[in-house]
Image (spheres, rainbow, N blue to C red):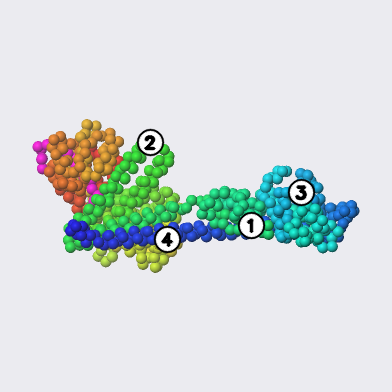
Amino acid sequence: MKHFLTLLSLYRTPLFILIIGLFLTTTLVVFEYQSITKQRAQAADSTLKKYASALQSSLDKRLYTLDSLNAFVHSYSQLDLTHPAQETQFQTHFDKYGKQLHQSIDGIISLQLAPQGIIRYLTGDANNKKALGYDLFEDDSRKQQIIRAIYQYKQVITGPIQLIQGGEAIIARKALFIDDSPNASAKRLKEKLLFIDAHDLPENFWGLATVLFTTEALLIKAGLTQTQQEGFHFALRGRHGLGTNGEVFWGDAALFTQNSHTTPIRFDAGEWILAVQHNTVFPILSIASITILGILLTSLSVYAEIVVSRNRRAAESERAKDAFLASMSHEIRSPLNGVVGLTSLLRKTQLSSEQSRLVGGIESSASQLSAVIGDILDFSKISAGKVELDYGPAQLKTLLQQCLDIVMPMAEKKAHKLTFQLAESLEDTTFKTDQTRFKQIVLNLLSNAIKFTDNTGAIKLSAEIRHQGNNTLLTVTVSDNGIGMSDSELSRLFQRFSQADVSTTRKYGGTGLGLAISRNLARLMGGDLSVISVKHQGSDFTLQLPFEQLHGKTQAQDTEMPAFNLDENLRILVVDDLPMNLSMMVMMLQKLGFNADTANNGLEAVQLHKSNPYNLIFMDWEMPELDGVEATRRIRSLNNKIQQPWIIALTANASASHKETCIKAGMNDYLSKPVSIDQIANKMQQISA
């Protein structure tokens, strides 16, 4: 319990951040779920209203034809249909009027007039003529509908039904009543017992008007046949106008048993129910993205708080700061070492075009991640005052050309014109500088110029000597005709974690640390980094460093190292405390044609070498029980008692102090993590006889 309380006290802030982070993540997920659900419901309701209105309009237009037929009959109500000449006149006018209705309204199969319930006038194709003379009063299945139409003065609707003559249609009827018409009579109603109360027989009953129209035309006119493109399923129920009591006659009946949105389509003859439902799956990816992002940000926040806490506790000692940064470098780069190494191994295998593309993506992402980690660690070192400069002789032209060679593929990809101008006096100049940091600054400037210049742009690298009073300055300028910057953007440019504006970060990426690091390095080297820029015209970045020319062209020579023959049966040992790194290194060496033994720490490595000496040892830096530096010292302390191996350090920290420690401990060379198979091959080739 005491131990638990101690841990709780030590990590109370990270625990609080974790709880708050998880709470906020859960809140955001719930909010996003409710928001998406609401948006989908609103979209469904909006779509439902849109198509319900269109369907209502399409249906009403067809049902209004009954009113048109009623108006037509009233217009010719004085014609006696028992008189041949007047009946012919009525027939002629009906045919003409019916043709106009057919032409103006899509999908009408037939219009029918049934004086006294007997169909005598109709339109449509030849199949419809079979209905002439049909007595609707003899149809028992229609009896109740006809009684309702006559005595309740309402339209009645049948269908959709399959027609005998083929196709599917909806049949709508309306009773017609005309005062003082020679054709009006209630006699047949009484004869056929089509009445509710004999005293209520309508003496002005003329007959029935009927319209048949296709369901397909109705739906097409309403736009419902194209709705799949909008991401929705639709269905209609209420056959014969029975509403919720009717059958589903179009669409998926399952919509009415699921959580669908519905609305009624009302008309004089009854009611239909229109249902709508999304046919797209719920966007769970959005929920998952927020969940993952929330957990990731919470984890990073907790991790950042732990790092800050450790760094805060270590602030009392410069040595503690240095140890912390070295530890972080190792902990981050060591897993990344496995990613880079295994990816480079995968690249050497037989890959399909798709697999090769995916591996390329992994390599690109790992490279970007490594750059981001490098920027953050560099800035941390600068902030902690732990950057060490390693001065030595270097040839200016060679250094600048190396920088150009590195960025050339990036420039060619964007079709940039990349030029190099070196003052004639500097062609063969050797000067004193920290080569690594000098190249880091120039590479950052060149990379930025390429990144922030649109395709087919122009980028120029130039170098010259300038004199300011008694000071001689080496001036390196990188010019481009890219996006440029305004004065307000320039004021933020060299701030950490900053780019010109937020949209730049979104479009071009980056940590926003590169220029801040470059300026700090330039100032640590006794110089400065400045910029002149015009919005949409380009930028000129100028690096100025104190210039100390060295006589002659001598470059720093590599420390003389013993060599061995790669053709020999080499005994190789790989030492690392991470199983992934061990297996990755062994696989890379096997790919190069060599076998290797493994050790999990420095102590085990020393014991293995004593029992059976090795020619070459790849030694990790930080390990439990015995680290790589101490293990190397113990091996070298054996002197001539045992064969001395070539020892290459594998380190996540390539600072000057680390390199010096490697050499002083007796290591011959070093490789900075992450390492690839090509780096291993090149290093072995360099040290071979």
Mark 4 nearby-residue class (10 Å; few <14, some 14–19, many ≥20): few
Q: Of circles 2 and 1, which is in front?
A: 1
The residue where tag 2 is placed is 350
The mark nearer the N terminus, 3 or 2, is 3
User: Where residue 475 appears, x then y in whole percent?
Assistant: 31, 59
Depth check, front residue: 44 or 381 = 44
What's under tag 4, amino acid-wise? Answer: Phe
Q: Is residue 506 visible?
A: yes
Inter-mark Cα distance, 2 to 1: 67 Å
Res 599 label: none
Mark 3 nearby-residue class (10 Å; few <14, some 14–19, many ≥20): few
Inter-mark Cα distance, 3 to 2: 83 Å
Highlighted range, magenta = 637-655
What residue is at 84 percent from the left and 57 percent from the top?
183
User: Where residue 473 appears, x then y in whole percent?
Assistant: 28, 61
What's under tag 1, amino acid-wise? Answer: Glu
What's under tag 3, amino acid-wise? Answer: Glu
Element marked by disc 2: loop
Element marked by disc 3: helix
Inter-mark Cα distance, 4 to 2: 47 Å
Res 271 label: 1
Q: Is residue 421 above or below residue 362?
A: below
Q: Quadrant of residue 462?
A: bottom left
Inter-mark Cα distance, 1 to 4: 38 Å
In the displayed structure image, the side of residue 481 where residue 374 appears, left or right: left
The mark nearer the N terminus, 4 or 3, is 4
Q: Are marks 1 and 3 in contact (CB under 8 Å)?
A: no
What residue is at 75 percent from the left and 59 percent from the top?
197
What residue is at 66 percent from the left and 59 percent from the top?
267
User: Where residue 575 appears, x then y in whole percent?
Assistant: 21, 42
Q: Of circles 3 and 2, which is in front?
A: 3
The mark nearer the N terminus, 2 or 1, is 1
